Image (cartoon, rainbow, N blue to C red):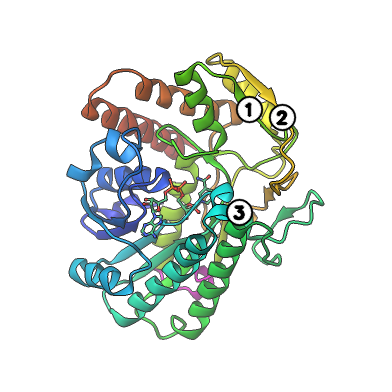
Amino acid sequence: MDLGFYSGKKVLLTGATGFKGSWLAIILKKLGAEVYDYSLEPKTDDDNFVRCNLKNKINSYYGDIRNLDEFQDYINFVKPEIIFHLAAQSLVIKSYSQHIFTYETNLIGTVNLIEIIRRLNTVKQAIFITTDKVYSNLGNNKAFNENDPLGGIDPYSASKACAEIAIQSAIRSFFSEPSTCNIASARAGNVIGAGDWAENRIVPDIYRAIQNNSTLKLRNPNAIRPWQHVLESLFGYLALAIKLSTQDTVYQSAWNFGPESNRDYTVNDLILEIQKHLSFKYEYQNDTHIHEAKTLKLDINKSKSLLNWSPILSFEDTIKFTTDGYKADLEPKTEEEIYQSRIKQITEYMERMNAN
Ligand SMILES: NC(=O)c1ccc[n+]([C@@H]2O[C@H](COP(=O)([O-])OP(=O)(O)OC[C@H]3O[C@@H](n4cnc5c(N)ncnc54)[C@H](O)[C@@H]3O)[C@@H](O)[C@H]2O)c1
């Protein structure tokens, strides 16, 4: 992967105040890109964006992607060459209580961005981040590939499947040859890593239980999820944008990013592995009103063969990267120290990637 591609380029993110976007902003800064962001304000002072003082390290603007005019004005002002669209209402449980906001943000926000890119001629590559939950999951233990039917039982998954349809339609309707801009969608698995404090996500819940000295309540110990360190999928997105610059139309499509599909790790496996690094109290409880798939697995062969990307961290290393990163968060460190601890993990990850 020629990461020198990003040096000196104007890259706009949406969602850098969130977990994945904040890590991506740090990577891009390290790669020498000029980084811009358009997203809502961070939710808490614990957020990676705040702890790493990204407000003062990148060009950040607080705005709502549902507001077409404001969103367009900002992108028009920045004139980015590359866009990574990560802004979303990203939580399944919240999608039940914030039903309309979830569709407006995840679907209409995506359509707004497609429309803005159509109207501008500066953007050359745009990656739209959806999720592994876009597939119609009938619970038959299948590893989904990019040609599998889309679906979604909960509103979050359904809103992202809708966004996928809009993106695939836009590729055919607006961005097929000849086009100044190439776009693609990225469907990643459950990512973990330091700096995530989102509600009702298992790893942040563990750290909240530690902070509050409370007992963590867990659901579905046997549910299988494509756990992956956040850096794995982010380097996949970076590889995809580089490939989109080649103008080969094969890259204008959907891409899965996840661990190897023969790695079946359950919620309980995750808990036991994290317990090797730190102790916390937990118990399983039945919570039947929320639909959750028993298994979720991705077939990543397309990304491996055509993007030359593959996951490099073992399950054990994924957990170690995560727990090491959170240790820095929980200690009384300065913003610069936290930022440098992220840079250190990114550097270590890149060294492993190059050695692979
Ligand atoms: N975290 C995961 O495990 C995971 C897995 C698969 C896919 N994803 C997807 O990756 C992307 C990033 O996820 P994350 O975990 O960083 O989410 P997050 O909740 O931590 O961050 C979401 C970001 O979107 C922004 N945002 C939300 N609504 C907005 C609006 N109306 N206008 C402007 N900005 C808005 C927030 O301000 C924040 O910056 C999302 O699209 C999510 O659906 C995440």
- Separation of disc 2 and disc 3 at Cα? 25 Å
Q: Which residues are magenta?
A: 245-253
- Separation of disc 1 and disc 3 at Cα? 24 Å
Q: Is residue 147 left or right of residue 239?
A: right
**Residue at horizontal 68 percent and vertical 59 percent from the top:** 145
Callout 3 crowding tier (Cα within 10 Å): few <14, some 14–19, many ≥20: many
Label annotation for residue 132: 3
**Along the polypeptide, which appears first: circle 2 or circle 3?**
3
Residue 71 visible (yes or no): yes
Callout 1 crowding tier (Cα within 10 Å): few <14, some 14–19, many ≥20: some
Mark 2 lies on residue:
285
Mark 1 lies on residue:
217
**Going by the picture, which residue comes out furthest to the front?**
97
Mark 2 within 8 Å of ligand 1, using the beta carbon? no
Secondary structure at badge 3 equals: helix
Q: Amino acid at mark 1?
A: Lys
- Establish if 219 lies above or below 305: above
Answer whether residue 247 is magenta in the image. Answer: yes
Secondary structure at badge 2 equals: loop
Which is the main secondary structure of the residues drawn in magenta?
A: loop
Q: Amino acid at mark 3?
A: Asp
Q: Amino acid at mark 2?
A: Gln
- Establish if 319 lies above or below 187: above
**Along the polypeptide, which appears first: circle 1 or circle 2?**
1
**Along the polypeptide, which appears first: circle 1 or circle 3?**
3
Q: Nearer the viewer, residue 237 or 356?
A: 237
- Separation of disc 1 and disc 2 at Cα? 6 Å
Secondary structure at badge 1 equals: strand
Q: Are marks 1 and 2 in contact (CB under 8 Å)?
A: yes
Mark 3 within 8 Å of ligand 1, using the beta carbon? yes
Q: Nearer the viewer, residue 222 or 351?
A: 222
| Total numbered badges shown on the rendered structure | 3
